[in-house]
Image (cartoon, rainbow, N blue to C red):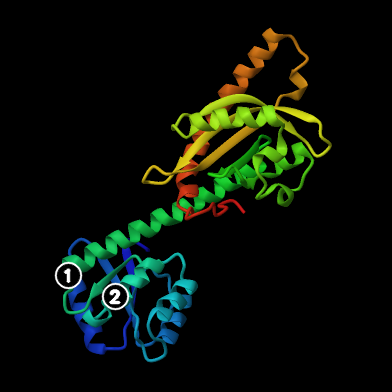
Amino acid sequence: MSENITNILVIEDNPGDVVIIREMFKDVEGIHFNLLDAGNLSDGLKLLVKEDLDLLLLDLNLPDSHGIDTFLKMNQNAPNIPIIILTGLVDEELAIKAVAEGAQDYLVKGQIESQLLAKSIKYAMERKNIERKLRESEERYRLMVEKAQSGVFLMNSKNKLTYVNQSIAKMLGYTVSEMLKKHISNFTDREGEKLIHYHLDKTEKRMGQTYELRLLNRDGIFTHVLVSTNPLFRDDGTYLGAISILTDISSRKSIEQSLMNTLKEKDENFFLIMESMVEAMKPLIQNEYKDEYFDKFA
């Protein structure tokens, strides 16, 4: 969008439909549109490269492309541009499928009027902008997690590790791939496993937990860590697993208790900050769940 002008490309092989759409835009008040059109997908892709576009209105059945493939090809070439599908009544099911694949909306030809068109365009652009910001946030959080000195790991509902960052892998002397898909009990003793289950039981009741734990490194030596665990749930309340952040406190175990308590308090203040990051990450993680974790940070 430049100088408050919304640049829209209509990819439609019926000249009559293009004329109707142009006339509709004339009736929209308060928004200035610059309308371009192409009669086939090939010409549309060429304009995509040449023009600074804000939105696409796309007919799925074109002379050189048909059906859902039309949307998939265009979306692949314009992942950051919102796409609204133009469809006839007989193709409405196909349009719904395109929306499921990432189109922002669909409009049925013959049932479109100016205000509906303007509203659809406004919402499509807003939703695409939100998606873009979400992706950018996701990337920032992913980088924060990878660069964090603290260990971060995700467990599924079966207590198997589905994500570990480099810090925890290095802390325990493993590679990331060596730890993935392993049960958490592989990295602690029986006492530690009981402790984990105790706190996970509370976690499943939607209670965040901070506690000390002993983890076994590759050489069988214990590493003392402070763990902060937060639960993950589906919208229906089903427990999915937990995301945990931990910091190595092994070097502090030999110091006097009063100093240890002070340092632990600082750690817990740090966890309050980290947990804010966790809360922001949880929707990103939960959106990727089906039956198992899909690693959002890989």
Q: Residue at x 78, y 15 (%)?
A: 254
Looking at the image, residue 247 lies above or below residue 238: above
Find out whether the residues at labels 2 and 1 contact each other: C-beta distance under 8 Å.
no
Q: Nearer the viewer, residue 196 or 217?
A: 196
Q: Nearer the viewer, residue 209 or 275?
A: 209
Please state the horizontal and vertical placement of residue 267, each as a whole percent of the image: 62, 23
Q: Residue at x 46, y 82 (%)?
A: 46
Q: Nearer the viewer, residue 82 or 294?
A: 294
The amino acid sitting under disc 2 is Glu
Labels 2 and 1: the sequence-earlier one: 2
Residue 20 located left or right of residue 134: left
Q: Is residue 132 visible?
A: yes
The amino acid sitting under disc 1 is Ser
Q: SS class of the residue under badge 2?
A: helix
Looking at the image, residue 27 lies above or below residue 134: below
Please state the horizontal and vertical placement of residue 224, each as a whole percent of the image: 72, 26
Q: Distance of mark 2 from mark 1, alpha carbons?
A: 23 Å
Residue at the farthest bottom position: 63
Residue beneath label 2, please?
A: 93
Instruction: Give the total of numbered labels.
Output: 2
Looking at the image, residue 81 lies above or below residue 9: above
Residue beneath label 1, please?
A: 114
Report crowding for label 2: few under 14, some 14 to 19, many 20 or more residues within 10 A (C-alpha).
Answer: few
